[in-house]
Image (cartoon, rainbow, N blue to C red):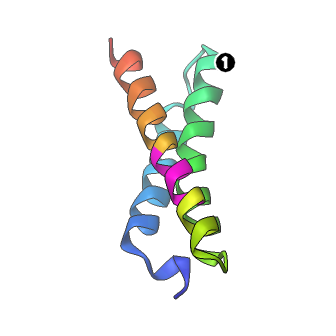
Amino acid sequence: MRFEDLEVWRRAARLCAEIYKSLADLRDFGFRDQITCSALSVPSNIAEGVERRSAKDKQCFLDIALGSCAELCTQLYINAV
């Protein structure tokens, strides 16, 4: 299976692109960079996990993607306040 075939990867990649576009004018550069790094980490780790050969490696990268998703959600909540 290719990671590009996964709906979860496609949605995460689209979300990442939308976040980059919507935060382009955010003047708090550190906060913007943190959010965009978290957003980029989700599809990147999904892709890396899917391409790994061992089940243990796959699970590790998918766990990292899940953690990055939680990190991103937290940052977006804070940005909305």
Residue located farthest toward the front when viewing the structure as drawn: 56
Q: Quadrant location of residue 33? A: top right
Image quadrant occupied by the C terminus: top left
Residue 19 versus residue 27 in the image, above or below: below
Left or right, 57 with respect to 1, comes to right
Residue 53 versus residue 56 in the image, above or below: below
Q: Nearer the viewer, residue 26 or 50?
A: 50
Percent across and percent down for residue 20 are 55, 41
Kindly identify the residue that appears in the image at 41 percent across and 18 percent down: 79
Residue 41 versus residue 27 in the image, above or below: below
Asked whether 48 falls inside the magenta stretch, the response is no
Q: Nearer the viewer, residue 35 or 69?
A: 69
Percent across and percent down for residue 40 are 59, 48
Q: Which residues are magenta?
A: 61-66
Kindly identify the residue that appears in the image at 49 percent across and 41 percent down: 67
Q: Nearer the viewer, residue 54 or 5?
A: 54
Q: How many marks?
A: 1
Residue 5 versus residue 10 in the image, above or below: below
Left or right, 26 with respect to 81, comes to right
Q: Residues within 10 Å of mark 1 (few under 14, many from 20)?
A: few
**Disc 1 designates what residue?**
30
Question: What is the magenta segment's predominant secondary structure?
Answer: helix
Can residue 34 be seen in this snapshot?
Answer: yes
Percent across and percent down for residue 70 are 42, 36
Can residue 49 be seen in this snapshot?
Answer: no
Percent across and percent down for residue 65 are 52, 51
